Image: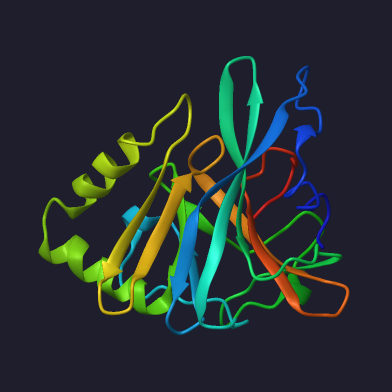
């Protein structure tokens, strides 16, 4: 783990770490299941896909896996602090930065990280196969991004939203998207490993509880 980056609060509920003068309340919400035909996960801004998104180098079992978000609420404001894919029931006891090909965590300095860029206030998880489909639709169907926005508006509660859309009916493969913390920026993801060394979860940390980190 580099510097102040630590997703240890990802599964915490109730009072969270202080943010300025406020202590937000954390609450987990289950959004659905992520369907992974290949087990290669892409995390990105779904409105910026090009078809060349790289999956994380660590693969997981193909199949269906629960997706959750942990939302921090304070003074009438609610923000997605963490987005989570679960792969087992055991809690994570060790964290490792999720990397794509060509990235080396050993090159990072204090407080630095590798993450994905957000320019539409939204992050997502999807299979690498689905990323290509989404890129094709975003290009060929001029208003497909508009359809995604409409889907997110249907779940909107002040001040976050989410969607779960099937893009490959043959396999059921989908994209699960969610608001990204305070909005645009660059955000790291982490693999959580349980006490047996198995992958317990994948967590994207939207930076509500750390500062001074750089991409």
From what the image shows, is residue 29 above or below residue 23?
Answer: below
What residue is drawn where x is 56% and y is 61%?
Answer: 66
Q: Nearer the viewer, residue 39 or 95?
A: 39
Q: Quadrant of the N terminus?
A: bottom right
Which residue does the image show at 74% across and 49% down from the upper left? Answer: 11
Looking at this rendering, what residue extends furthest in the front direction?
89
Judged left or right of residue 211, residue 162 is left
Q: Which quarter of the rendered picture does the C terminus lie within? A: bottom right
- Pinpoint residue 160: horizontal percent, then vertical percent: 47, 33
x%, y% of residue 141?
A: 11, 60
Residue 136, how many percent across, how many down? Answer: 20, 70
Judging depth in this view, the residue of 102 and 16 nearest the camera is: 16
For residue 108, above or below residue 75: below
Q: Residue at x 77, y 79 (%)?
A: 198
- Whether 191 is drawn above or below 145: the answer is below
Asked if residue 175 is positioned above or below residue 197 in the image, the reply reads above
Q: Position of residue 25 (x, y in %)?
A: 72, 28
Quadrant in which residue 139 is drawn: bottom left
């Amino acid at each position: 783990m580099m510097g102040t980056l630590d997703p240890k609060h990802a599964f915490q509920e109730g009072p969270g770490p202080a943010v300025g003068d406020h202590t937000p309340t954390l609450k987990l919400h289950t959004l659905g299941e992520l369907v992974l035909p290949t087990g290669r996960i892409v995390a990105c801004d779904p409105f910026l896909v090009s078809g060349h998104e790289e999956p994380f180098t660590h693969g997981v079992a193909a199949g269906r896996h629960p997706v959750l978000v942990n939302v921090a609420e304070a003074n009438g404001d609610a923000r997605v602090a963490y987005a989570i894919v679960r792969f087992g029931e055991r809690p994570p006891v060790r964290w490792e930065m999720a990397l794509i090909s060509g990235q080396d965590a050993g090159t990072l300095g204090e407080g630095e990280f590798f993450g994905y860029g957000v320019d539409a206030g939204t992050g997502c998880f999807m299979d690498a196969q689905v990323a290509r489909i989404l890129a094709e639709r975003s290009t060929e169907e001029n208003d497909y991004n508009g359809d995604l926005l409409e889907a997110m508006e249907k779940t909107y509660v002040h001040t976050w939203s989410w969607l779960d859309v099937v893009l490959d009916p043959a396999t059921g493969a989908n994209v699960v998207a969610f608001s990204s913390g305070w909005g645009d920026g660059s955000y790291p993801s982490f693999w959580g490993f349980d006490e047996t060394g198995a992958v317990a979860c994948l967590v994207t940390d939207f930076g509500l509880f750390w500062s001074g980190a750089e991409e």
